[in-house]
Image: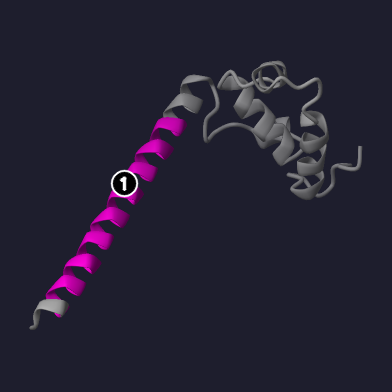
C-alpha cells in the first residue's frame, strides 16, 4: 500500500468515525427529548383522539416544553407568528382520523 492509499484510507476512517459520533449525538438528543416530553406528561400511550391532526400534536408538545405562541412572538419580536394557521394546515395535511371533519 503506497502513501496516498494510506492517506485516503485514513480520511475514510476519520469520516466514518465522525459520522458515528454524529449519529450517537443525535440518538442522545432524541432520548433527551423523549425523556423531557415524558416528564411533561406526553407519552407513547397518549391518546391521539385528543388531537385533530399533526398540528394539534406539535402544538401540545411545544407547549409542554414551554414554547408557546406568546413566547415565540416575544423572542422573535413578532406581532403575529401565524402559528394557528400552520397548526390548521398541518391538521389538514396529516389528520389522525379519516372520519373526522378536518376542513375547519
Give the x, y percent position of residue 68.
Answer: 67, 20
- In the figure, 20 relative to 85: above or below? below
Give the x, y percent position of residue 61.
Answer: 60, 28
Q: Give the residue displayed 28% in from the left and 54% down from the top.
A: 18
Q: Of 7 and 71, which appears nearest the observer?
A: 7
Q: Of 12 and 91, which appears nearest the observer?
A: 12
Residue 33 among those drawn in magenta? yes
Residue interval drawn in magenta: 5-34
Residue that mark 1 sits on: 24
Element under disc 1: helix
* Residue 17, image quadrant: bottom left
- The reply, left or right, for residue 48 in relation to residue 41 is right
Residue 83 among those drawn in magenta? no
Q: Give the residue displayed 28% in from the left and 49% down from the top.
A: 21
Q: Give the residue displayed 40% in from the left and 31% down from the top.
A: 32
Q: Of 51 and 28, which appears nearest the observer?
A: 28
- The reply, left or right, for residue 4 in relation to residue 17 is left
Give the x, y percent position of residue 77.
Answer: 71, 19
Amino acid at each position: 500500500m503506497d502513501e496516498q492509499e494510506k492517506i485516503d484510507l485514513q480520511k475514510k476512517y476519520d469520516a466514518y468515525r465522525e459520522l458515528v459520533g454524529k449519529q450517537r449525538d443525535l440518538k442522545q438528543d432524541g432520548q433527551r427529548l423523549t425523556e423531557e416530553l415524558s416528564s411533561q406528561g406526553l407519552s407513547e400511550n397518549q391518546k391521539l383522539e385528543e388531537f385533530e391532526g399533526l398540528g394539534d400534536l406539535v402544538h401540545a408538545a411545544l407547549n409542554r416544553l414551554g414554547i408557546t405562541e406568546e413566547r415565540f412572538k416575544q423572542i422573535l419580536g413578532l406581532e403575529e407568528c401565524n402559528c394557528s394557521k400552520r397548526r390548521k394546515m398541518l391538521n389538514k395535511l396529516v389528520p389522525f382520523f379519516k372520519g373526522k371533519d378536518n376542513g375547519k
